Image: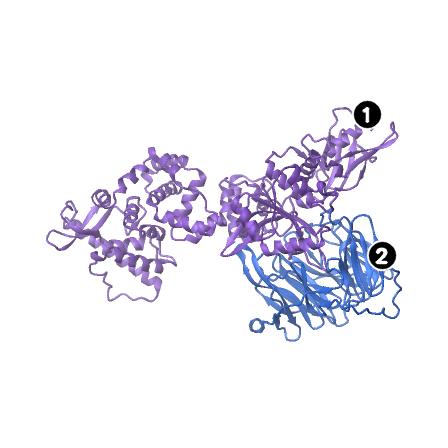
Amino acid sequence: MVWISLLLLSFNLLAKELPKFLTKHSTESIRFITLDGRYAYVQKRQGVLGLVSSFRSVDFISDHSQSDFIIKDSRFKQRLAIEIIPNEQKEFNLLKNHKIVVVDWGKTQTREVGMGRVSKLHLEDEWISFYNPLEKVISLKNILTQRQYQIKLSSKTSPYFFPEVEMISADTVVYTDTNEKGYIALIQYNLVTQKSNVLYKSSQNGTRLELCQDKGYMAIGEFPFDDIARSSKILQIKLTGTTNLAGYSTIYSSTDSDLGNMICLENSIYFIKTLVHLKKINSKQTEAVKLDLKTTLVSTVTDLGTVTQLVAMDGRILVPFRGDYHVLEGAANLTDDKLKSPLPGDEELPLDL
Amino acid sequence: MKTSPPFWPNQYYKKLGTALTGLCLSFYVNAQTTPLPTPASVEYPGIIESLEKLIQIDNTKFAKKNDLLIKSGKLGNDLTSVTALDIDPDYLNSIILHSDPGYVKLASSNKCQFYSSIINDLLRNSEGKLKNVFVTFVNKNKERDSAILLKKDFINKVASLECPETAKLIDQFQVKNLDTTISSANFDAPTGKDQCHNTYLEWLNNSKTPYFCKLHEFMKEAQTKAGDPKDLVQRQAISAILQKKLNANQRDYLENICENLDHEELFCEEFLNVSFWSKVANGTQNKIYIEDICEKVLNTKSLNDLQLKQCVSKIRKENDLCLYPGGRNQGLVPAPQCDTLATALNFSSLRADYKDCPASNDQQAVTNVSRLLLNISKEKIAPMNGPCSVISSAVAFEFNKRFDNDENWKLEACFDDALADKEVCYKTFFGGYGNIEESYNVVVANILRKTRGADESLKCEMIDSEDYNSLLLQYKSGCFIIYERNRCFTSECKHRILYNDRVIDFIKLKNRVLLDYFATNIIDEKFSQHYLLTHDYRQNGRIMSNMGAINAFFKKNKAAIVHGVGCAEDLLPSFFKTRAFNQCTPMPFIIDGLIRENDKTSFVTRSAVDTLQAPRIISWSLIYSAVKSYQRSHPLRLWTLYGLD
């Protein structure tokens, strides 16, 4: 209790006006841009994805099904996962599987991975996980060896449940699963022995678990859905090179129904906190906050009123807000006209004709 | 063991007592006599003990005064020459201590309301119902004196004279005049907090309220078999007559106001919140809203009236029971908590008397459009066969067909026609709905007639694989389409066809149901669902670009409907996490009500993956962000939020 009181006392407001994210390209078309702006993956039009660098531009994915694209990186910066979403504007389907491919960082050579959603790169970007909501199966694939494992979730999970997955080592994975009563659990699974054990089971239903990882730790955030009156907390498991995940410590706890949507960094975790909640009309004031892992101090870093999501892209932390992106970390203005030379070893991009 | 007197003071006692004492002082300032003496021996270890003592003192005092007045023959036979006639203050104290605080509050509105409360037996003293009334007055010798009046005499000699409306009111509430009286009363449920506050004050100050509450108390006593058992049968018979004159809604309304006269919040909560469940329990709202919840709560598939009431009672007590409903009508879970859901449903106007199983639909545009169409047309739900998403599929298909857009419904069932030496395809949707010839079971039967010489009367039936048993004789002949419920959607459906116990595998399904909700290019604009709705179907579409516009739209028409498409990550941020830059999952949704609290406004909203019976309350900020973000990713950068009227 003392700890919680201290935490509350330490909650302070450091919000300042955040700069908007500016690029030379129209931000609507960008699907991924590096921190220095040297490489940008751009959706040229529906079904066409191109890579634009200082001197060259190449369209490297093109299809006829009016696809849209989303691109994800990881802290390892070795590869990018690209999800190709077919008929984005004509087939409104949350259970639709996307075609997943990977490219090496800043390159255009694609490697097919499989069909699914919520892809995520792991372990120096040598592994990728994705989920097939129709089959309720998590796939884990080694990009180099093509070795693939599958984990079947409980058949009683709701149709729109999407699990969180983190790989701890080449044979240890943790993922979330839920039962029909809405109690969520974190499960550790050994890919080799196919044995699993429950690391954490929520004591309250109506909540979800989020996972994120950075150097030396994995964070587990438990946050309520929508307006359900539940508490929120963030747990931390120190990763010490072993696969023993038994012990965790609580680094944040609140009776507020926080939104979560965590982003893990080496020394801090960004997430969205509910500051005011008018339950009757389900109106919330939500802001991005930064949890310092050393001091467990929580500081508010936005003053926008209704922050709902946070996006990490090559070390840049962005806050999408009413059609714009505001920058929390990393350079905000990439509009300078200086052409950056290709890095040594970069592939030669053909001219975009 | 100590026993509590009737209407034992609750936590509001102190406040009420103070208020009423003050009120009595102001009304009857001339009637003050020696205050109630406190015996020297009484100790007050705590507030409960002191209240008990007060009651005890009051009882003694009341009995003594009653005896004294009767013995001294002060029966108030002649009050014509007296002045400053008032109610005895000790008598008032006794009423305050023994009456329902709600009726005390009603009685304290004004003098006539107080008299009416006495006339209608709403107040109590230490003896229970008031049989007589103690009054004080200044007699002809200019001395303050007291008398005891029979209640009947009090009505005739005091109440009727001081409140001339009394006789008229009594007449209006005679059984023969009740119909007219009831029909002239306003039992409309308030729809907002401010309106409810005004409604509450109107009832509190309405001179008919004590009489209406008498009706409520009369029916309650008869139902609970309270009161004198000698005349119970007679009272129950009168109660039955009263119940026929008041409909269920009016009875509930009276119960709410009469039981909550001193609790404005509870009175309003009944209308603005949990009362939705009461409406379901008393049959004024469709029980479809609660069926899937109760299926899980009571572990039963059909609900009788008793079970329905048991379920409602549980839902009111356990707010989380609405989170994960049971049944086949699955959607996005968790649904809202019961109190939030009740509030949302109270402000919702979208038709929801059918189940469209959104999780069984892989084209949310179809779910949303069919919800709009069925809300506008009010057409009956036709007999259906197969997955319950067939309602949405069939309604959306028929709509597109009616306006010559079935060309863009690409899902087809095909077979090789050996005679014509070509592939023949029929437009279709999975399931059977009414007499629509594109129903998959009808299409399959047609193909079997053409390829297997099946009889003209052949009908194919869609069977849930969980209900299918290959050993049963009924499946040995005829045509059956065995589908897997969890894998049967609008665009694809995992199934197999059996015709006379043989597998039919030559029917190939082609394409998917792809539709533009809003136009994605200029050339095909007229094929978008929004265009068809607003041009061909002639619904007036008004762009809703700010909260002012949407407020004005709902102000003009409370049953208005707004539809749109926004990014799911902004609309429902706790369900859908943004994991990449410019990620936007388009999600159609319908807004069908608004809720205001102070200067804030939220909207009753159903995303296309929410069940019809479980709308959510979503703030304008989230709705605006969702549409704004979708505008970024839309090929024509359209603003996609429109009112339909």
Please give the chain letter of the residue carrying mark 2. A
Q: According to the image, label 1 marks what residue?
A: B453
Q: Which of B226 and A37 is in front in this view?
A: A37
Where B503 falls versus A299 (above or below)? Answer: above
Q: Give me the disc on residue A64.
A: none
Number of numbered discs present? 2
Q: Nearer the viewer, residue B39 or A149?
A: A149
Which mark lies nearer to you, 2 or 1? 2
Give the quadrant of the N terminus of chain B.
bottom left
Secondary structure under the numbered disc 1 in the rendered image: loop
Chain B tint as drawn? purple
x and y percentages locating residue B462 in the rendered image:
72, 35
Residue B103 shown left or right of residue A132 in the figure: left
x and y percentages locating residue B492 in the rendered image:
76, 42
Q: Residue furthest left?
A: B141
The colour scheme of the drawn protein is by chain
x and y percentages locating residue B459 in the rendered image:
73, 28
Q: According to the image, label 2 marks what residue?
A: A60
Residue A65 shown left or right of residue B279 in the figure: right
Residue B390 shown left or right of residue B502 in the figure: left
Secondary structure under the numbered disc 2 in the rendered image: strand
Q: Which residue lies furthest to the front in this view?
A: A337
Q: What residue type is labelled 1?
A: Gly
Give the blue chain's letter.
A
Please give the chain letter of the residue carrying mark 1. B
Q: Disc 2 and disc 1: Cα gap in Å?
A: 52 Å
x and y percentages locating residue B63 in the rendered image:
23, 53
Q: Which amino acid does label 2 sit on?
A: Phe
The answer to whether residue B575 of the structure is visible from this angle is no
Other residues around mark 1 within 10 Å, as few (<14) / some (14–19) / many (≥20): few
Give the quadrant of the C terminus of chain B.
top right
